[in-house]
Image (cartoon, grey):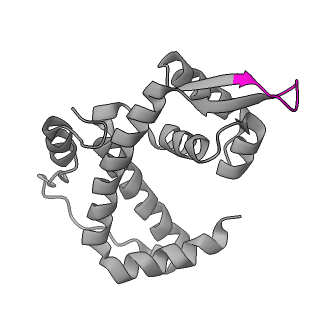
Amino acid sequence: MSDRRLSQRDVQVARRRGTPREQTDDRKSLDIGVLNEHLGYFIRRLQVWVFQDFIRTLAPVEIRPAQYSVLVVIAANPGLSQSDLADRLGIERARLVRVLDKLERRGLTQRLASPTDRRSHALRLTREGQKILKRAAMLAALHEAKLIEKLGPEQRKSMLTLLKHFDR
C-alpha cells in the first residue's frame, strides 16, 4: 500500500461501518417539548452523530477523535509543548497525558526534552505516526464527505463559519 492512498479494504471497512443502522423496532416518535427551541440540544445531537460516524470511519486505523486532533496539531506544530497542546485543544492536561501515553505506546508520537525549557516536553510524530496520520486524514475526508452529503456544501461552509466564532 502506498502512503498516499488508502487500501481498498480500509475504504470498504470505513464505508460499511459508516452505514447508519436502521431502526428495526416500532417505537413511537416522542415529543421533545421545549427542546425543539434549544440550540444546545441540537448541537449536542449533531456532536453525537459526528463522533459516532468519525469513530466508525477511523476504526481501520484505530484512532479516536481526541487522538486524531492531537496527531494533527502535533504534525502542524512539531516541537509543541504538552501544555500548549492541551490549551489549544481544550483538553484537561491529565487527560492529554493519557492520550499521549497511548500514542507513544503505539509508536506514533515522541516526547523529547524541550530545547528551551527543561520542565516541558517537545512533541513530535514518529515516522509511523506520520504514516498513520496520512491514512487517518484520508479516512477523515470520507467522514467529511458524509457531512457534506447530509448538510450540503453551502450549509457545511456556513456552519463552519458560525462555529469558528467559538474557537479561540
Magenta region, main secondary structure: loop
Instruction: Answer left or right for 50 relative to 11.
Output: right
Vertical placement of 113 versus 69: above or below? above
Q: Report if residue 51 lies within the magenta region.
A: no
Residue plotted at (36% across, 83% down): 154
Q: Is residue 98 visible?
A: yes
x, y percent for residue 49: 36, 57
Name which quarter of the figure residue 166 lies in: bottom right
Q: Report if residue 116 lies within the magenta region.
A: yes
Instruction: Answer left or right for 81 relative to 30.
Output: right
x, y percent for residue 150: 27, 70
Residue plotted at (38% across, 41% down): 134
Q: Is residue 63 visible?
A: no
Vertical placement of 81 versus 155: above or below? above
x, y percent for residue 92: 71, 40
x, y percent for residue 13: 18, 39
Quadrant location, the N terminus: top left
Name which quarter of the figure residue 122 lies in: top right
Name which quarter of the figure residue 48 lies in: bottom left
Vertical placement of 122 versus 154: above or below? above
- Considering depth in this image, is 3 or 86 the residue closer to the camera? 3
Instruction: Answer left or right for 148 relative to 168.
Output: left
Instruction: Answer left or right for 148 relative to 99.
Output: left
Query: What residue range appears in magenta?
Result: 112-120
Quadrant location, the C terminus: bottom right
Residue plotted at (29% across, 78% down): 152
Residue plotted at (67% across, 43% down): 91
